[in-house]
Amino acid sequence: GAGVSQSPSNKVTEKGKDVELRCDPISGHTALYWYRQSLGQGLEFLIYFQGNSAPDKSGLPSDRFSAERTGGSVSTLTIQRTQQEDSAVYLCASSNTGNLGAFFGQGTRLTVV
Amino acid sequence: GENVEQHPSTLSVQEGDSAVIKCTYSDSASNYFPWYKQELGKGPQLIIDIRSNVGEKKDQRIAVTLNKTAKHFSLHITETQPEDSAVYFCAANTGFQKLVFGTGTRLLVSP
């Protein structure tokens, strides 16, 4: 597709379960970001991948959160032992080395019950 | 690291008025400043950006200005319309392309 694709669009999970959120960036984009947005709040940085460099994980809120980017393309954000405070919209964005503008997906709305 | 401050947090204007949102940044090496518009239930959308080699850029009713000396940049929307109502985020790059976002401005345009 032409844009950043995220799946699922909505996810309801029980407290304590693990979840995986997927991001398909725009083809050829070397940079990929994950952000979290709670209802009515701003963008909370989670993790940043750039090419083959070590990812910037400085925004991950706890060791229950991890992310991978395989083959420099698709990324998966994993949240283990989910808690109610993890409920939020998780946004992915990608950008091209030559053009610094980042393009966002529609997000995954995660609800932990 | 880079810190981006944005204000106001909320802005209410009448249709047809102008709206201005301001951001400041801390990293003097930042050279790219995009603005995003987020409508309810959607991801942020890039609406305009400016690079450090220019001081102003316009696109129809929106414009951005940049003052590198003072480390601040602003979004100007003229002749506002109800459909401009949204949350707007500024951002600045730092390090190797990483973007740091402001906290957002909720703009409400009343008919």
Image (tube, rainbow, N blue to C red):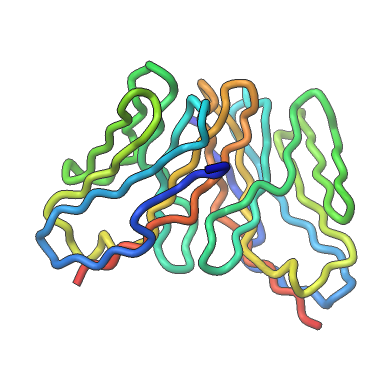
Q: In which quarter of the image is the C terminus of chain A?
A: bottom left
Judge left or right: residue B35 versus residue A48. right
Judge left or right: residue B51 versus residue B99. right
Q: In this view, does B111 lie above or below B63?
A: below
Q: Is residue B98 above or below residue B21?
A: above
User: Which residue occupies the foreground of this view, B2 or B54?
Assistant: B54
Q: Position of residue B4 (x, y in %)?
A: 57, 42
| Furthest residue in direction bottom, as rendered | B111
Judge left or right: residue A101 versus residue A63. right
Q: Position of residue A21 (x, y in %)?
A: 30, 49
| Furthest residue in direction front, as rendered | A1
Whether residue B111 appears in this view of the structure is: yes
What's the residue at 44%, 45% (across, down)?
A: A92
What's the residue at 51%, 22% (across, down)?
A: B95
Quarter of the image for residue B57 reads top right
Whether residue B9 appears in this view of the structure is: no
What's the residue at 66%, 61% (across, down)?
A: B8
Q: Position of residue A86 (x, y in %)?
A: 26, 59
How many labels were placed on the picture? 0
Q: Position of residue B66 (x, y in %)?
A: 79, 36
Quarter of the image for residue B37 reads bottom right
What's the residue at 44%, 24% (across, down)?
A: A50
Quarter of the image for residue B28 reads top right
Q: In this view, does A34 lie above or below B1?
A: below
Q: In this view, does B93 lie above or below A23?
A: above
